[in-house]
Amino acid sequence: MSLDSDSSRAGRGGIDRALPRLHVVTSDTVISADPFVDRAHLILEAGGSGVALQLRAPGASGRDLYRLAESLAPVARRSGSTLLVSDRIDVARTAGAHGAHLPGHGLGVTDARTVWPEALLGVSVHSAEEAGAALGADYLTAGTLFESGSHPGRPGAGLERLHEVRAAVPDTPLLGIGGVDPERARAVRAAGGFGVAVISAVWGPAATGEGARFPSADEMEERVRTLLEAVGTPPGPTAPGPVPGPDGAPALD
């Protein structure tokens, strides 16, 4: 089956669901801005099965991440969207998320599968070598492709990074990340990427702490819909998919 097909499935451990082409990533400043929860609900509902929300906040405690993930999981279930928690697989599993996104320096895919066999697992990579070490992941985010507001002054590697990673792991869906806007999202898809992961393109100034302001609700919904169209996914909710239930183990602080 072609990895470029909308019928590509994610969750090698048992979650049968299509991998979203658009992943919206948070940051410490994003989750601290008001009203984050309302805006997160909007993204999940507007994107439906075409969007994944990756709850990432390196400065937040496990307790705070758990509370946020637990409040967002029912919305993801109802809208058919996907909820992931970055790094904290314990939080993701206990809160009822679909899976976790693992940083390159974090828990390995093999160990994560041992902890949570049915999880949807992604890994951040910045080279072909790192991609090769992440075998078994359901998808990879490859970057940083372009200079971004969240990493000012750091030049992007360009689409060549995507080509290098794809050559190393041709059977794994790749998402381009770093300075991606709708035009660049189309370029990522044309270069063979499965989809994109974005921060500022949806969250606006709140992503970089510049006043910690979100765009209006209408503008954010339009941003999501424009990005979905750029990656080739019709916007809008679909029938909800299964969400793994908590296993009762407490999340770590």
Image (cartoon, rainbow, N blue to C red):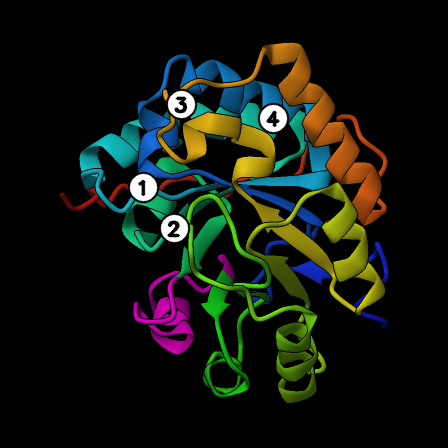
Contact? badges 3 and 4 (CB < 8 Å): no
What residue is shown with label 4? Answer: 43
Q: Which residue is nearer to you in this view: 151 or 118?
A: 151
Q: Tell me: residue 164, above or below residue 25.
A: below
Left or right, 156 with reference to 21: left
Label 4 vs 1, first from the N-terminus: 4
Q: Quadrant of residue 178?
A: bottom right
The dot on residue 86 is 2
Give the residues in magenta. 103-121
The answer, for residue 71, to whether it is visible in the render is: yes
Q: Quadrant of the C terminus?
A: top left
Question: Disc 1 marks which amino acid?
Answer: Ala
Question: For mark 3, does the 10 Å Cα neighbourhood hold few (<14), some (14 to 19), or many (20 or more) residues?
Answer: some
Quadrant of the image containing the N terminus = bottom right
Q: How many marks?
A: 4
Report if residue 247 is visible in the image: no
Q: Mark 1 — residue? A: 57
Disc assigned to residue 71: 3
